[in-house]
Image (tube, rainbow, N blue to C red):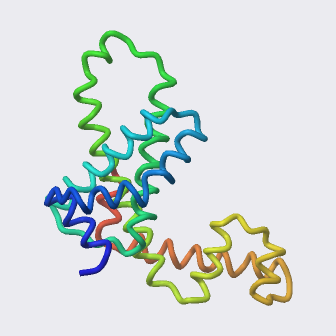
Amino acid sequence: MNKNDSYLEALVGKDDRKIAEIYEKYYDNVKSYIMSNGGQEADAEDVFQRVLLQIAVRYRKEKFEIKSGFDNYLFVACRNSWIREAKKSKKMLTSELKDDLKDDYAVDLSLGLLEQKRWELFNDGLSQLSDKCKKILGLYFAKVPYDQIMDALDYSSETVARQRVFKCKAKLKEIITKNKLYNSLKEL
């Protein structure tokens, strides 16, 4: 059993030792992100716990595989949850909305699961690309300027680098849109 699967099984099986290991290894990174983006330590604790619960609920319903590292998967899910929560907290709560907070939790859980599935679809598409395209898009998504992409990959000009990025993005889009899950995930 790989590390990702052992963490997923621990969450579902409520293995306190493994869950403590997850907190020990990954919580500080999430806490740093949330606190540097307008949150408090209590917010980080809430988000981290909620995301672990979302992952456990989803894994219990449908066994899925994390193709990236568990740490990346968990961090992205926590980041997305915090972004949603931060946006929501900027809006004023009316008394009607306060009554619907229970429903909001269910919606938040659903959105978290949806984002995780979209992230998996993206990673699955990325894994099907050639190594060269993976490298090109890795640099592009890291916001490396085209002149540096040109140098790193030994292209003759920035135009060539731009064309390669465009072609790799188009190939990734083609792979993702051909996936049978794509239509069900884009509608939500």
In the rendered view of the protein, which quadrant contains the N terminus? bottom left
Q: Give the number of callouts.
A: 0
Query: In x, y percent, where is residue 185?
Result: 33, 57
What residue do we see at 24% from left, 60% from top? 17
What residue do we see at 62% from left, 82% from top? 135
Depth order, front residue of 113/46: 46
Q: Is residue 79 above or below residue 13?
A: above
Decide which of 170, 148 is in the foreground and name it: 148
Left or right of 40? Residue 5 is: left
Percent of width and height locating residue 48: 37, 46
Q: Residue at x 80, y 90 (%)?
A: 154
Depth check: give the residue in front, 43 or 182.
43
Outermost residue toward the top? 95
Q: Is residue 60 above or below residue 33?
A: below
Side of 72 where 167 appears, left or right = right
Give the x, y percent position of residue 60.
15, 59
Say which of 147 and 164 sits in front.
Answer: 147
Residue 71 screen position, x and y as percent: 43, 64
Q: Is residue 6 toward the left or the right of residue 165 in the image?
A: left
Q: Quadrant of residue 46?
A: top left
- Left or right: 74 with respect to 55? right
Instruction: Give residue 37's quadrant in the image.
Output: top right
